[in-house]
Structure formats: structure tokens, C-alpha cells
């Protein structure tokens, strides 16, 4: 096990370097940092342009990409105070990135914990009696709700509960002009975005958990457990659910990508100042110094969570030998 | 629904039987009516209530969207009233504009039909393209195995794990930045570009599916038999492997249509989609325009296009479900 983890960790380094280099090249070609700098600062002179080029390592040609990437990576690793500044207003990149990261973490954490536990719970309940009314209700609802794109459910919820009924605020984390921390107001503002992300999560996990429990249901060890006279309750929690969770847990690790994707949509509709708003703003402007740290952090997240999923799989199911 | 045809016995045989005094009617009952697999799949498909209803609804919606000269009441950029005839912006639903009007007085009902047409065109075109690429790559990887297979699985793993919206915006900008590609796939905001973009993301799922099918089938006896009589790899793929995995491929085709429709709508919603204009105003763009209206409470701007998108999504999901049930060979003995 330890050997497996160490080997995978060592493999992570070249994977990260290759993927971040590809992302770097894609961003250099896709957003053309020099042109977007001139667009954002139409009155910038030759001197400022050259300073920007130097600060970001925007050298021309294929060898310039490698050199630029190397310089950029070195600055990135040395810490936020060395990062190049944003093209709009020349502000620090780390401050807004950290702020939006923690906003997103709050939203994603609440939505993921609530959504995954509710989804798994509903899945277990539905699988108790396949074809029963609860099973059919959960399944049908998940089918219909799973078909609704998140931006549609976000717009509809906003229209219904924020604009028409006026029960909840339509956007933001706090009302304009609010200073300091206020838990009640924050919960009020978080409710709608959390629900939008939760809907998708619950729909996915309830179907997945139901299938997984039913998969385990016909296995020999359950029959053995029952024949030993263990109570049905104990069979359910100690034997059936525990084994059914194995594939579901690993999916959570892989799912982090789609969770972030859903957040980008939700945050933009509810104007919630998280990573999604940060990314779309930076992408529309072509803000090279802001885009790159964001994308690298996302790449690290995806790769680390995939690794965690693999490790969790090996850990939860000792039959699987990975090395 | 389908009438079972009585097996035809030539009249001469019947006459001969009558002469010999044999009761042929009793034997006729023993004849088993044979269904072809396609016929059985057809029956199972229409027996799936959700799929049957969805097919009818989708057919009606598609007819309305394609026959816009008949069904649309105004042009895509036409205003319902001349300015001098009175206020024409943000009208709530009424007889001159069934679904209300938008910020410059255009009829939402007509725009919706044009939007469905554009979205479905993008969806169907990119689904076909991604299924073609995915089938070719998947079959090759599954049959050959080795390094190419490993590499392909790694790359698709990475792409599928990446947040979809971030990946697609990144690839969009990247392809748009490669100026030598522009004459082939069009500019960043053209329909052609969007179709290619979704094909690039869509083929990976199909390729994994086809690869799995090929891996499962290639050790079976009939493939071995084909190889024994000297069939080439190409022939094995085209006339043995693909016909046997046509079911999952068709289901994947259906589901990638709605995947592309929803994906394109999401991109357009954020302003990364095709430029609006004749035949390129998509559903997502219309929903994106409604954002300000929603904050003011002009519900009709969002409710009707969102409803249309959800209707399309649910109908196509049902059709995919019905196809899965109908084409699964394991169910052939059922019903």
C-alpha cells in the first residue's frame, strides 16, 4: 500500500508538469496575452508593454514558450508576492483569488456535504423495496431533475423565490453596503445557490447508491449474515451499505471536476463572488496573470482528487491490488 | 399495434389437403410467427411509454421548428409592432405575442422556434461527428490495444476529469487562436466552430464505450471464426464488431445530441457561443438575454425558453432510455 502511494505521488510530478505546460501553451495561444493587454490598456506605451512582457515571460516562438513557462513556474512556486500583476488596474492576483477560493469552498462544501449525504440516504431508502412507491418516486424525480441543466434550474429558482415571492435575496453574499460578518444574512444568500448545486448532486448520487446497494443485495455474504440470524438492521448497515459505499466513495473523488463546473454556472447566475465569477471575468478579459494561477490550481485539484479516489478504492476494498 | 400476419399457405396445397381429408387449420396454429430482431426492437421501443410519448412530442416540436415559414408569426429580428403604433418592448404574453416580447420588441414565440432549430442543428451535427470519430478511434484502440490504447485512455481520463466548462472555454480559445485552422473550422463565433468544438469533447465518451464493446466481443467465437477464414481487421470491425454493438452506439448518439444542446446553451448563456443572427440564435443565447429581465420580474423572457430546453432534454433522455431497452440483445426473449 505504502509503495503504491509513493509511486503514484512520484508519478504526479511529471503529470503535473506536462499538463500545466499544455495549459500554459493553450492560454498563450488562446488568449494572446499581449493583444489582450493592449485591449485592456489602450493607452499603454511601448515601455509599459515591454515591462508587461518581461514580467510575464511572454517570449515569442516555441523555445520562448518553454523559457516563459519555466520563468512563470519559478515565480509561481516562490509565492504570491512574486506573481505578475493583473492587466486591469495592476492589482495583486493572490488577494482576489484567495477571497473567491474561500467563498467557493464555503458554497461547495455545504452543497457537497448536504447533497451527497441526502442522495446516498435517498438511494438506500429507495433500494429497500425495489419497485415500491418510494423507489419509483425517487427514481422518476431523479430522472426528470437530472435532465434539467443547472443554469435553467438556477434561473427558475431565482425567478420564483427571489423575484416573484421575494423570500430570498437574488444575488451576492451580502446586501450592498453590508460590513462585517452576519451568519443569518449569509445563510439567506447561500440558500438558493446551494439548492441548485444540491439538486444535481442528489439526483446523481441517489441513482448511483440505489444501483450499488441492489448490486450488493444478491451477494453470498448477505445471505450468510441473514442465515446467522443477524438483525435486518445490522445486515443493512454493517454488511450491505458498507460494501455498497465503496464504488460511490471513489466516484466522489472523480466527481470534483463536475462539481466545480456546476459551481461556475451557479456562481455567475447568483453573482456570488467565487472562483466561477473570477474565471469568467478573467476569461472574457483575457487576463493572463489572473487566468494561469487559477487554471494551475484547478489542475492540481483534479489530479490530487483522482489520486485520492484511487487510494480510497484500494483502502476500502482490500481485494483490489494496485501494484 | 402491429398485426401478426398469418402464414400464407399456397391454395394448391390447401386443395390437396382437402382432397386427402386432412384438417389443415389445426396445423396452421403450430406455425410460429418469426420476428426479425429489428421488428422486436421496434415493438419494445413503442411499448416503452415514456419513449413513445417523447417521440411524438419531439416530432411535433421539430416540425414546428423546421417549418418556421408556416409556424413562426414574425421574423427572428422582426418587431411585433412599429414604434409609432405603441409600446412594443417587454409586453407580457397577449394575442399579438403569445410568449411576450423582449427588450427590443421581438416576438418571443417566433424567436423560440428559431432558437430550437439552431440548438438542435448544432446538437445533431456534433453528435454525428463525435460518434463517427469516437467509433473509429474506439474500435482501433480496442482491437489493437498496446501503446495507442494506453495513451488514449490516459488522455480521455484527464479530459473527462477536468471541469467541463473550464476545459471547453480553454479549448475554444486555443482553437480560435490557431489562425491556420480558421478557414477550415470557421471563426470562434460561427456555428461550424461550435460543432467542431463539441465533437472534440464528445468523441471521448463514445470511444471508451466502443472500445469496451470491442474488448468484450473480440474474444468471442464468431470473431475467431471470421479471423480463421482470413477476414481482415477492417472487415471484422465493419461487418462483425460494429453491427453487434449498434445498440449502445445509437443510445450514445441520442444522449450526445442533448449533451451538445445543453453544453452549447451553457456556453451561449455566458457569451461564449455563436454570434446571434439569422439561423444562429440558439436557445442558450435567448435564455442568456433574459437575465436582466428576470431580475425585474419579466418571467416570460425566461420561462418559455427554459421550458423548451427542459422539454427537449427530457424527451431525448426518454428516447435514449427507450432505445436502450429496445436494443439490448439480452432482453430479446422478453415481452
Image (cartoon, grey):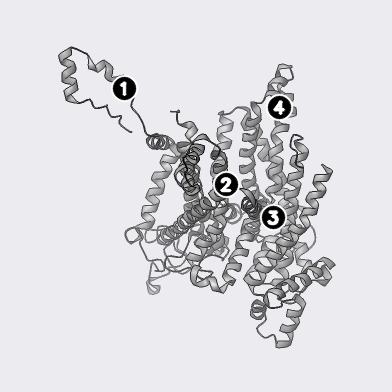
* Residue that badge 2 annotates: B142
Left or right of B168 on screen, residue A294: right
* Residue that badge 4 annotates: A236
Q: Residues within 10 Å of mark 1 (few under 14, many from 20)?
A: few
Q: Residues within 10 Å of mark 3 (few under 14, many from 20)?
A: many
Residue positioned 27% across, 27% down in the render: B7
- Pair 1/2: label in front: 2
Q: In the image shown, does A213 or B183 lie closer to the viewer? A: B183
- Pair 4/1: label in front: 1
Q: Secondary structure at mark 1?
A: loop
Residue positioned 63% across, 30% down in the render: A214
* Cα distance between the residues tagged 4 and 1: 51 Å
- Pair 1/3: label in front: 1
- Quadrant for the C terminus of chain A, please: top right
List x then y, in percent, for residue A196.
Answer: 63, 50
Chain letter for mark 3, please.
Answer: A
Left or right of A81 on screen, residue B243: left
- Pair 4/2: label in front: 2
Amino acid at each position: 500500500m505504502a509503495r503504491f502511494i509513493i509511486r503514484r505521488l512520484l508519478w504526479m510530478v511529471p503529470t503535473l508538469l506536462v499538463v500545466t505546460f499544455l495549459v500554459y501553451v493553450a492560454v498563450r495561444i488562446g488568449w494572446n496575452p499581449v493583444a489582450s493587454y493592449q485591449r485592456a490598456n489602450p493607452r499603454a506605451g511601448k515601455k509599459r508593454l515591454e515591462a508587461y512582457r518581461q514580467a510575464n515571460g511572454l517570449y515569442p516562438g516555441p523555445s520562448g514558450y518553454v523559457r516563459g513557462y519555466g520563468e512563470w513556474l519559478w515565480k509561481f512556486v516562490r509565492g504570491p508576492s512574486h506573481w505578475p500583476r493583473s492587466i486591469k488596474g495592476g492589482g495583486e492576483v493572490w488577494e482576489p483569488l484567495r477571497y473567491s477560493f474561500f467563498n467557493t469552498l464555503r458554497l461547495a462544501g455545504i452543497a457537497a456535504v448536504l447533497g451527497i449525504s441526502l442522495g446516498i440516504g435517498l438511494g438506500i431508502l429507495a433500494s429497500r423495496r425495489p419497485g415500491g412507491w418510494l423507489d419509483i418516486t425517487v427514481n422518476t424525480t431523479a430522472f426528470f431533475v437530472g435532465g434539467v441543466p443547472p443554469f435553467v434550474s438556477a434561473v427558475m429558482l431565482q425567478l420564483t423565490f427571489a423575484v416573484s415571492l421575494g423570500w430570498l435575496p437574488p444575488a451576492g453574499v451580502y446586501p450592498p453596503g453590508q460590513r462585517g460578518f452576519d451568519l443569518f444574512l449569509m445563510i439567506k444568500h447561500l440558500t438558493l445557490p446551494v439548492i441548485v448545486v444540491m439538486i444535481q448532486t442528489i439526483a446523481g448520487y441517489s441513482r448511483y447508491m440505489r444501483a450499488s446497494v441492489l448490486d450488493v443485495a444478491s451477494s453470498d455474504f448477505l445471505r450468510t449474515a441473514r442465515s446467522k440470524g443477524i438483525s435486518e438492521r445490522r445486515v443493512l448497515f454493517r454488511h450491505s451499505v458498507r460494501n455498497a459505499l465503496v464504488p460511490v466513495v471513489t466516484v466522489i473523488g472523480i466527481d470534483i471536476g463536475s462539481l466545480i463546473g456546476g459551481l461556475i454556472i451557479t456562481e455567475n447566475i447568483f453573482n456570488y463572488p467565487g472562483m466561477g465569477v473570477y474565471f469568467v471575468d478573467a476569461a472574457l478579459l483575457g487576463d493572463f496573470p489572473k487566468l494561469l494561477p487559477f487554471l494551475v490550481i484547478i489542475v492540481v485539484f483534479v489530479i490530487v482528487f483522482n489520486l485520492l479516489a484511487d487510494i480510497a478504492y484500494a483502502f476500502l476494498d482490500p481485494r483490489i491490488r494496485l501494484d | 399495434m402491429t398485426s401478426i400476419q398469418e402464414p400464407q399457405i399456397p391454395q394448391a396445397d390447401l386443395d390437396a389437403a382437402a382432397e386427402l381429408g386432412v384438417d389443415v387449420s389445426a396445423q396452421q396454429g403450430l406455425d410460429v410467427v418469426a420476428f426479425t430482431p429489428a421488428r422486436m426492437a421496434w415493438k419494445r421501443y413503442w411499448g416503452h411509454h415514456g419513449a413513445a410519448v417523447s417521440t411524438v412530442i419531439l416530432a411535433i416540436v421539430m416540425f414546428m421548428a423546421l417549418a418556421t415559414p408556416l409556424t413562426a408569426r414574425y421574423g427572428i429580428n422582426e418587431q411585433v409592432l412599429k414604434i409609432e403604433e405603441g409600446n412594443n418592448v417587454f409586453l407580457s404574453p397577449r394575442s399579438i405575442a403569445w410568449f411576450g416580447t423582449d427588450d427590443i420588441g421581438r416576438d418571443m414565440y417566433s424567436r423560440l422556434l428559431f432558437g430550437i432549430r439552431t440548438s438542435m442543428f448544432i446538437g445533431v451535427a456534433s453528435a454525428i461527428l463525435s460518434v463517427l470519430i469516437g467509433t473509429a478511434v474506439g474500435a482501433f484502440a480496442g482491437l489493437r490495444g498496446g501503446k495507442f490504447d494506453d495513451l488514449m485512455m490516459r488522455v480521455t481520463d484527464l479530459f473527462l476529469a477536468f471541469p467541463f466548462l473550464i476545459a471547453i472555454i480553454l479549448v475554444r480559445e486555443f482553437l480560435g487562436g490557431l489562425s491556420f485552422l480558421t478557414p477550415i473550422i470557421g471563426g470562434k463565433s460561427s456555428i461550424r466552430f461550435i460543432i467542431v468544438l463539441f465533437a472534440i469533447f464528445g468523441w471521448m465518451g463514445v470511444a471508451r464505450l466502443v472500445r469496451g464493446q470491442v474488448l468484450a466481443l473480440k474474444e468471442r467465437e464468431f470473431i475467431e471464426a471470421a479471423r480463421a477464414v482470413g477476414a481482415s481487421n477492417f472487415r471484422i470491425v465493419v461487418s462483425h464488431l460494429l453491427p453487434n454493438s449498434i445498440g449502445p452506439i445509437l443510445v450514445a448518439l441520442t444522449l450526445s445530441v442533448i449533451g451538445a444542446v445543453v453544453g452549447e446553451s451553457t456556453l451561449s448563456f455566458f457569451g461564449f457561443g455563436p454570434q446571434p443572427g439569422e439561423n444562429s440564435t440558439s436557445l442558450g443565447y435567448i435564455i442568456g438575454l433574459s437575465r436582466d429581465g428576470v431580475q425585474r420580474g419579466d418571467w416570460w423572457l425566461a420561462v418559455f425558453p427554459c421550458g423548451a430546453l427542459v422539454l427537449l432534454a427530457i424527451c431525448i433522455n426518454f428516447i435514449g432510455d427507450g432505445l436502450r431497452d429496445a436494443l439490448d440483445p439480452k432482453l430479446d426473449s422478453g415481452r
